[in-house]
Image (cartoon, rainbow, N blue to C red):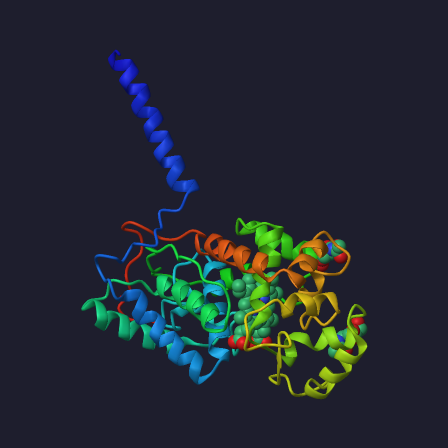
Amino acid sequence: MGSRGYFFVLLHAFVFVSLATSVFSQLTPNYYDYSCPNALSTIKSVVEAAVQKEYRMGASLLRLHFHDCFVNGCDGSILLDPSPTIDSEKNSRANFQSARGFEVVDEIKGAVDEACGKPVVSCADILAVAARDSVVALGGPTWDVPLGRRDSTTASRDAADASIPAAFFNLSQLITNFKNHGLDEKDLVVLSGGHSIGYAQCVAFRDRIYNDSNIDPNFAQDLKYICPRTGGDTNLSPLDQTAAKFDIQYFSGLVQKNGLLHSDQELFNGGCTDELVKEYSYDSDDFFVDFGNSMIKMGNIQPLTGNQGEIRVNCRKVN
Ligand code: HEM
Ligand SMILES: *[C@@H]1O[C@H](CO)[C@@H](O)[C@H](O)[C@H]1NC(C)=O
Ligand SMILES: *[C@@H]1O[C@H](CO)[C@@H](O)[C@H](O)[C@H]1NC(C)=O
């Protein structure tokens, strides 16, 4: 082969490698095997203790990973506190007085850095692993979490406002929002199953119980005691009937028009996602397998890798 031939082989190799790294994630479940062999067991034990103490914490940690990944990728940006240079995502519409679990993340970070003897595990990876461990602690499926994300040095409240879906979204808005993050209709349905655990505040479902017609009237009536027309904005209701257990109750609830959020019921309202909701409402094995796969897909959204970003020492602050 002449030098031209080698050039083309090299060119092809180069194109293939750059394509591969952009299409396939560089993350790997074994990332910390040598640098910190106890990282995963340390995270797991802190998460288990936190969920034992308050089961809702499992839901709150799962949501943090979602809200991290949907804003400029899974880069730990949601964890940065406000500062002169950080327009904190904690103050965005979806997160303000709603996102919680930051103290547990601090606790995990402290424990894992001690176990490793140095700060080698990123805050973004801690969120991804804590989300998985939370789901497992509440009876859900497990999956291998690809790792190796690095932490951002920036955050954006505006990006959070523009990227995190809202409870008043209709189906087409939800589909478009997920599509903008590289996730399809199936991922939307599967990942909304995260609402199998945890709670929502009255302000997030008031319009639904007073104004929506695709709601079981008895269900709506019961909720009106918890969530009056005025006042009680922060009163909580479980997102499904078994908020402490990761199961398919969320989907059977949707089939019975017992979705708590407007966005939940949109997934079973005569549209293209009805069939999948119905399937998950009786097939827990399918839901569990698909949930793990879609969580991996969500966790692969635009991670910082290689020498991008940093490994934060304190998840709340840029180094
Ligand atoms: C599809 C679009 C989604 C919308 C519109 C949405 C909206 C919401 C809202 C409004 C709440 C209640 C927050 C509050 O009242 O303080 C909530 C809670 C929650 N969301 Fe979502 N969500 C969506 C998708 C997801 C996804 C993909 C996950 C995870 C895979 C998730 C996990 C959770 C969890 C676990 C809670 C309960 C948190 C707690 O109790 O602390 N959500 N969501
Ligand atoms: C969904 O909401 C958008 C924005 O408000 C609106 O333009 C669209 O017509 C709605 N779609 C459906 C099917 O209701
Ligand atoms: C319901 O819809 C009416 C009319 O569009 C609106 O004025 C009201 O704020 C909505 N929400 C509730 C809780 O009634």
In the rendered structure, the answer to whether residue 270 lies left or right of residue 252 reads right
Residue 109 picture location, percent across and down:
30, 72
Residue 178 can be seen, yes or no = yes
The residue furthest left is: 117
**Image quarter for residue 216?**
bottom right
Rendered residue at 66%/62% (across/down): 282
User: Looking at this view, is 208 or 47 the one in front?
Assistant: 47
**Image quarter for residue 284?**
bottom right
Rendered residue at 49%/80% (across/down): 55
Residue 231 picture location, percent across and down:
67, 88
- Quarter containing ligand 1? bottom right
Residue 262 can be seen, yes or no = no
In the rendered structure, the answer to whether residue 15 lies left or right of residue 210 reads left
In the rendered structure, the answer to whether residue 166 lies left or right of residue 159 reads right
User: Looking at this view, is 80 or 116 the one in front?
Assistant: 116
Rendered residue at 36%/36% (across/down): 18
Q: Give the tally of numbered discs.
A: 0
User: Looking at this view, is 274 or 319 the one in front?
Assistant: 274
Residue 4 picture location, percent across and down:
28, 14
**Image quarter for residue 30?**
bottom left
Q: From the image, which quarter does the C terminus lie in?
A: bottom left
Q: From the image, which quarter does the N terminus lie in?
A: top left
Rendered residue at 53%/48% (across/down): 182
User: Looking at this view, is 82 or 237 the one in front?
Assistant: 237
